[in-house]
Image (cartoon, grey):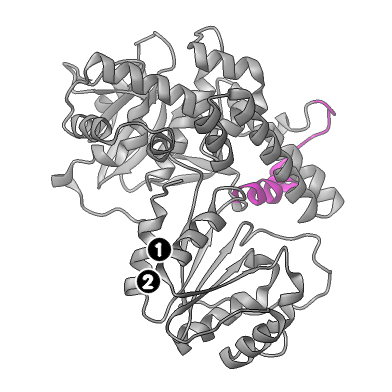
Amino acid sequence: MRRKIYGELVRWKAEKGKECLTVKGQRQVGKTYIIDKFASENYAHKVFIDFNRNPELMAAFENGISVDSIVRELSIRMDGAEFVPYSTIIVLDEIQECPRARSSLKYFALDGRFDVIASGSLLGVTNTNARKGSDRGPLMPMGYERVITLRSMDFEEYLWAVGFPQDVLDQVKTKMASKTALDQAEYEVLSRHFRDFMIVGGMPASVSEFAEKGSYSESGSELDKIVGGIVNDIDRYNDPINSRKTQRCFESIPEQLGFSNKKFQYSRIDKASGSRASADKYLENLLWVESAGYGNFCYSVEAPTLPFRRIDDSFRVYMSDTGILIRMMGTSAARAVHDGAIGFNMGAVMENEVAECISKCGFKPYFYRKSSGKNQMELDFVIDLGGESAVIEVKSGKDRSAPSIRKVKDVFPIDRRMIFEDGNIQVDGEGIEHYPLFAAAFIDLLENKSAIRFRSG
């Protein structure tokens, strides 16, 4: 599996200075695979430690966190491990299981004899199963680690995995960047691949099964295992009460997105029980879902103009991987996406996919919704696109009406208006940019380079 993060690992090795590297991200996105591949291809010696599989190795970090002490203890406990200064990389996998190992990154960074990469699936989540009254634990290595996030595979990585011709992809990307219409064959083939990508998702195990066997059922089985693993993590890292509450939040995401008003509402969580839900009851559990990497929060803004001022208590929660969302919605959802069935509530799926694409391209999606007054309108997404305010509408069916995006420029000083739909690239008479849905996966190419002022990573 070819992953874009590999290039970031190479750059870290070249310019790291006194920094270790920590790769975070939800489970099953391929952290272990890509780190192990990088380590094997770029170092003469590799020491790989998985704290889940080898918890006994945590003891090497308990008696002190000096580099010499840790290396000595690991050498005793690991047969055949070679710690050769300046040519060895130490990989600390699932480091959230050993906080003292995380603290040791500072000392490895200052020492400089060994390169260290840590990876963790649930870094930063609240573990309510932790022993009450325990100490606060070791300090984190602030200033001595570079932290990057690995998400599930994006559409381009998926196309690499299924063997899509690189020269054709490069040609399509050039056309998108220049707002040039695609050939009909290019449009149809990539649209079909994008529908497959939504169903299969970007989790490497699912993509691998689909690339090898071309079977939705095989990739779906992998997604079932991943969803089961998410539930297991929720149980493992929460006490029984919070486990149930967190699981309810997670499982409510597909239903929340199915409403015309997709704003996350706590009352929908407890609808079946008839009890009264509130932020006081569920917010911490919902934030756990976000911190674990399973949900993308999309906050409302006061106005779709820069700088954005978000409204903290008004947000939508999209699933971080659309393949998981569709699997949770059931077989009928996958069939509808495959067939392009207009009767199915496709809006939730398409919006989730566009939110996923925007996030994977490094942008923070917001939305704008006003239910009354002259500013009454709903804008699916609002982003800072290279220093320009860009409003985005997602059209999932044949309906081409877009009253809000046509009205917004009369109310707010918007720089760009964009519609992602089942159609080719064009700029209409009102200056609205139209793109096929799959172009959302390349939205970074649509930046107006001459207008770029600043965009945070």
Q: Position of residue 187 (x, y in %)?
A: 29, 19
Q: Is residue 453 magenta?
A: no
Q: Are marks 1 and 2 in contact (CB under 8 Å)?
A: yes
Q: Position of residue 158 (x, y in %)?
A: 43, 36
**In the figure, is residue 83 to the left or right of 376?**
right
- Name the residue at 25% across, 27% down: 409
Among the 4 quarters of the image, the one containing residue 192 = top left
Secondary structure at badge 1 equals: helix
Among the 4 quarters of the image, the one containing residue 250 = top right
Q: Is residue 286 magenta?
A: yes
- Name the residue at 51% across, 9% down: 341
Kind of residue sitting beneath label 2? Lys
- Rendered view: 253 above or below 36: above
Q: Position of residue 254 (x, y in %)?
A: 63, 28
Among the 4 quarters of the image, the one containing residue 63 = bottom right
Which quadrant is home to the C terminus?
A: bottom left
Q: Magenta span covers which residues? A: 272-290
Secondary structure at badge 2 equals: helix
Q: Position of residue 114 (x, y in %)?
A: 48, 82
Question: Can you identify the residue that label 2 sits on?
Answer: 13
**In the figure, is residue 297 to the left or right of 330?**
left
Looking at the magenta stretch, what is its main secondary structure? helix
- Rendered view: 27 above or below 157: below
Observer able to see residue 263: no
Question: Which labelled disc corresponds to residue 9?
Answer: 1
Kind of residue sitting beneath label 1? Leu
- Name the residue at 58% across, 14% down: 335
* Within-10-Å neighbours for mark 1: few <14, some 14–19, many 20+: some
Question: Which labelled disc corresponds to residue 178?
Answer: none
